């Protein structure tokens, strides 16, 4: 029996072995210096860039230590910006000194792990306030020249385009994402168009075809044209940073040129598998990189899934696209008919292509990003075709701008119009119902079943195709097109299943602040507080990722115990994104006096009204019942008036069967003493959320003796300026015999209650 694509098969076996080894091994363990330690290292400048920090451009060097056998790099943020002539060149050997700053490690489920991300990119840590002690004269002339060309191109784009459009085009054409407009980036990301802001196969193919075609028209022979075009593309890749998708696309393009040069047939799947094998041989940890998986998955969808999926849709709908050969043979007489046929073909092919890529990459999208932009398929129908216009227009305006800025501005008008169309489309799409589908992170078994069934369908199609030997019924069999389509819908639905077993409560690590998320056994979710003073954008980077990764689309209620920033800042961010993010169905505030509402709560009330979120108030004695879950407010009294905001903290006594929990906010002083009478006749506590982040001035011994909690949870920031939690409090808790959990050590602490049993999970352990 003849084995088809033997090189592809060998490469695929190697890739699968690497994936099995990496997935099964312990990850990301390497000796690192201490945080804040001042060190000196000698290394080679592998790359450099400018990053905007506090409104100032700071040079950043990527230095590979000469003592590191793994060629890992260190990000060096320079102390003095200086000028371009004083910044070391690519390839220079330098000795630098700076203060160590380690990358943040994820401490909550769903949170982006910056440490893991940079270790995949072979970067170990940062040096801040870096000074150059010594430097050599030798460098990499080609890389340095390409870097200078890139800097010059960025300046030209800044001169001929407005700030937002310039930042987008710098990302599209030059791979320069530093300074990318945050609003534009978020719009593209939410609508599934973020791929056009990265140098990917689309960009490489556009430029590669233009370069190769241009050289061919100039009459250059194939033996010279191939190496010349490949050289140009590799230089372009080095200039733009040579990202994962860029390397893959240029490698495959080079193989295509090589096949043409040696008179061989180019096979996309063989080229793709070879690219994966080479990349994983260099860096096996890329199997954890979302960009690697999405880039290769998209091409796999085109080469492997598209032929089968196209036939399924054609047989299901009865609409068949016409090839170019058939178009020439059966060309309609009228120009209108030809245009209609061509437009129909374009739309159908676009839908087939987009849906094939979506089917292939959907599990990866949900695993890393937890949500899917529902209308991205429709948007990409015209966004991708227009990208050739944007790319060509950007290159043309750049060339014109080098000669005369005014000519560049005029040449860039079409691109400005198209980018405006992109932005308007993205904004309007987000207003549509269900624009972003939050699906959560699927389990490994769900992904395995999904790809297992998909591979079976494709293998069956290819096997049937071989047996049919070109007959009209190829691809048919026991499974009809309708059954295959329903099976695909079924495995998509399987990815979205998030079974809820019992009651769970998670105490998130939000630094110096509080955030508690509860999920009832009926799937209803509640949040108590959500803010931080030590972590910026805690709603965007910690709270929302946690909710989205769990597949939580809405919160029945958010209790805000009091209006301090460390309890509300993240919720304010969530309200701003509630239109297309996690929906907040109600906001519950302490029922204090009208004067205090006007003074302390008015901003929260107005914010909620702006986003159509109902506001309710709760006071001592009020209860909220949701099936087995019950919330009872133990304080403050209705209409209370005080100068101390902490004393109006809402205290919530939570019951689920025999499980009891007390959430105390920042209650202190007289308000805390009043709690004793409320707790006297209640059951002993299972869980105590320690008040005021573990301050020694709260949670007195008398309080602990009365409540006698089994578990005590302390939420505080690492090395916070208040010294929380105080040792005096820890001693009181230990004396009482509590099991103590701190978010600074455990990360997010999750308690799952099922059939009377409690399971405690610490994210960092």
Image (cartoon, grey):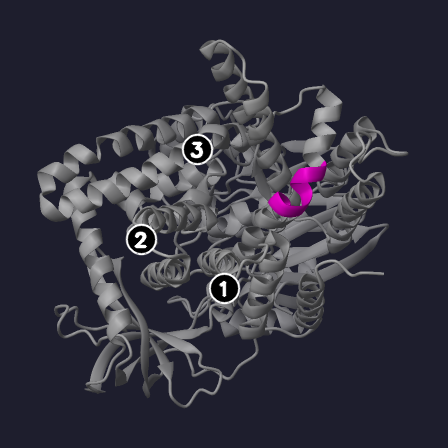
Which sits in the foreground, 719 or 372?
A: 372
First along the sequence among labels 2 and 3 = 2
- Density class for disc 3 (Cα within 10 Å; few <14, some 14-19, many ≥20) is few
Q: Position of residue 437 (x, y in %)?
A: 59, 34
Judged left or right of residue 288, residue 473 is right
- Residue at label 2? 174
Q: CA distance from mark 3 to mark 1?
A: 32 Å
Residues under numbered marks 2 and 3 in contact, where contact means CB atoms less than 8 Å apart: no
Quarter of the view holding residue 133: bottom left
Which sits in the foreground, 160 or 723?
A: 160
The quarter of the picture where the N terminus appears is bottom right
- Residue at label 1? 117
First along the sequence among labels 3 and 1 = 1
Question: In the rendered image, is residue 686 in sight?
Answer: yes
Q: CA distance from mark 2 to mark 1?
A: 22 Å
- Which numbered circle lies on residue 385? 3
Q: Position of residue 243 (x, y in %)?
A: 43, 60
Q: Secondary structure at mark 3?
A: helix
Q: Residue at x 50, y 40 (%)?
A: 560
Which sits in the foreground, 227 or 152?
A: 227
Q: Secondary structure at mark 2?
A: helix
- Closest to the camera, between mark 3 and mark 1, is 3
- Density class for disc 1 (Cα within 10 Å; few <14, some 14-19, many ≥20) is some
The quarter of the picture where the C terminus appears is bottom right
Magenta segment: does it hold 724?
no
Residue stretch in magenta: 301-308
First along the sequence among labels 2 and 1 = 1
Which sits in the foreground, 631 or 222?
A: 222
Q: Is residue 184 above or below residue 606?
A: below
Question: In the rendered image, is residue 684 in sight?
Answer: no
């Amino acid at each position: 029996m003849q084995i088809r694509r033997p090189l592809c098969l060998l490469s695929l076996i190697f890739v699968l072995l690497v994936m099995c080894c990496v997935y099964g091994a312990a990850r990301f363990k390497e000796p690192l210096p201490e945080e804040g330690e001042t060190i000196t290292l000698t290394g080679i400048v592998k790359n450099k860039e400018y990053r905007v920090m506090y409104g100032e451009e700071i040079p950043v060097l990527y230095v590979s230590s000469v003592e590191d056998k793994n060629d890992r790099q260190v990000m060096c943020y320079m102390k003095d910006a200086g000028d371009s002539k004083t910044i070391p060149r690519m390839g220079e050997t330098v000795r630098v000194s700076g203060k160590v700053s380690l990358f943040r490690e994820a401490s909550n489920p769903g949170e982006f792990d910056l440490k893991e991300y940079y270790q995949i990119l072979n970067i170990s840590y940062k040096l801040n306030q870096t000074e150059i002690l010594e430097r050599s004269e030798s460098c990499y002339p080609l890389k340095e020249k390409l870097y200078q060309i890139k800097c010059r191109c960025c300046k030209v784009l800044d001169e001929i385009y407005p700030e937002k459009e310039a930042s987008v085009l710098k990302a599209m054409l030059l791979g320069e994402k530093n300074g990318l407009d945050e609003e534009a980036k978020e719009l593209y990301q939410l609508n599934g168009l973020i791929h056009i802001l990265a140098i990917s196969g689309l960009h490489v193919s556009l430029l590669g075809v233009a370069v190769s075609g241009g050289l061919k028209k100039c009459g250059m022979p194939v033996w010279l044209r191939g190496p010349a075009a490949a050289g140009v593309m590799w230089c372009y890749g080095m200039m733009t940073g040579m990202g994962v998708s860029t390397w893959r696309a240029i490698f495959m393009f080079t193989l295509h040129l090589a096949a043409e040069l040696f008179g061989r047939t180019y096979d996309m799947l063989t080229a793709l598998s070879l690219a994966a094998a080479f990349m994983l041989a260099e860096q096996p940890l890329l199997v954890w990189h979302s960009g690697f998986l999405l880039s290769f998955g998209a091409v796999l969808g085109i080469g492997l899934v598209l032929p089968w999926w196209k036939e399924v849709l054609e047989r299901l709908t009865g609409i068949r696209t016409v090839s170019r050969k058939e178009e020439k043979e059966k060309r309609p007489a009228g120009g209108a008919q030809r245009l209609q046929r061509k437009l129909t073909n374009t739309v159908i092919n676009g839908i087939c292509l987009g849906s094939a890529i979506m089917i292939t990459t959907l599990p990866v999208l949900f695993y890393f990003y937890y949500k899917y932009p529902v209308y991205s398929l429709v948007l990409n129908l015209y966004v991708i075709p227009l990208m050739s216009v944007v790319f060509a227009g950007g290159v043309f305006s750049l060339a014109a701008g080098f000669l005369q800025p005014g000519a560049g501005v005029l040449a860039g008008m079409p691109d400005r119009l198209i980018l405006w169309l992109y932005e308007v489309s993205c904004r309007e799409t987000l207003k549509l119902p269900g624009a972003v589908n939050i699906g959560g992170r699927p389990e490994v078994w769900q992904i395995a079943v999904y790809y297992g069934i998909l591979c079976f369908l494709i293998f069956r199609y290819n096997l049937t195709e071989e047996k049919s030997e070109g007959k009209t019924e190829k691809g048919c069999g026991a499974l009809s097109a309708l059954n295959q389509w329903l099976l695909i819908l079924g495995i998509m639905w399987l990815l979205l299943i998030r079974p809820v077993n019992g009651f769970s409560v998670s105490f998130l690590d939000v630094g110096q602040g509080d955030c508690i998320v509860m999920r009832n056994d009926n799937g209803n979710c509640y949040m108590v507080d959500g803010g931080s003073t030590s972590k910026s954008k805690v709603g965007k980077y910690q709270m929302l990722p946690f909710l989205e990764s769990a597949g939580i689309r809405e919160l029945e209620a958010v209790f805000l115990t009091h209006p301090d920033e460390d309890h509300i800042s993240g919720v304010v961010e969530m309200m701003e994104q509630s239109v297309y993010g996690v929906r907040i169905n109600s906001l519950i505030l302490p029922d204090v006096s009208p004067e205090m509402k006007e003074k302390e709560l008015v901003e929260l009330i107005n914010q909620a009204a702006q986003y159509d979120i109902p506001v309710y108030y709760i006071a001592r004695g009020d209860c909220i019942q949701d099936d087995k879950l019950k919330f009872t407010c133990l304080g403050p009294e209705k209409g209370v008036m005080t100068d101390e905001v902490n004393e109006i903290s809402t205290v919530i006594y939570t019951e689920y069967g025999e499980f009891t929990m007390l959430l105390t906010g920042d209650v202190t002083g007289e308000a805390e003493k009043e709690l004793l009478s409320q707790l006297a006749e209640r059951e002993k506590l299972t869980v105590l959320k320690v008040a005021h982040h573990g301050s020694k001035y709260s949670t007195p011994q008398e309080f602990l003796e009365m409540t006698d909690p089994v578990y005590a949870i302390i939420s505080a920031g690492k090395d916070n300026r208040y010294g929380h939690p105080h040792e005096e409090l820890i001693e009181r808790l230990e004396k009482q015999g509590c099991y103590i959990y701190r978010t600074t050590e455990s990360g997010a602490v999750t308690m799952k209650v099922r059939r009377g049993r409690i399971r405690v999970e610490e994210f960092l352990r």
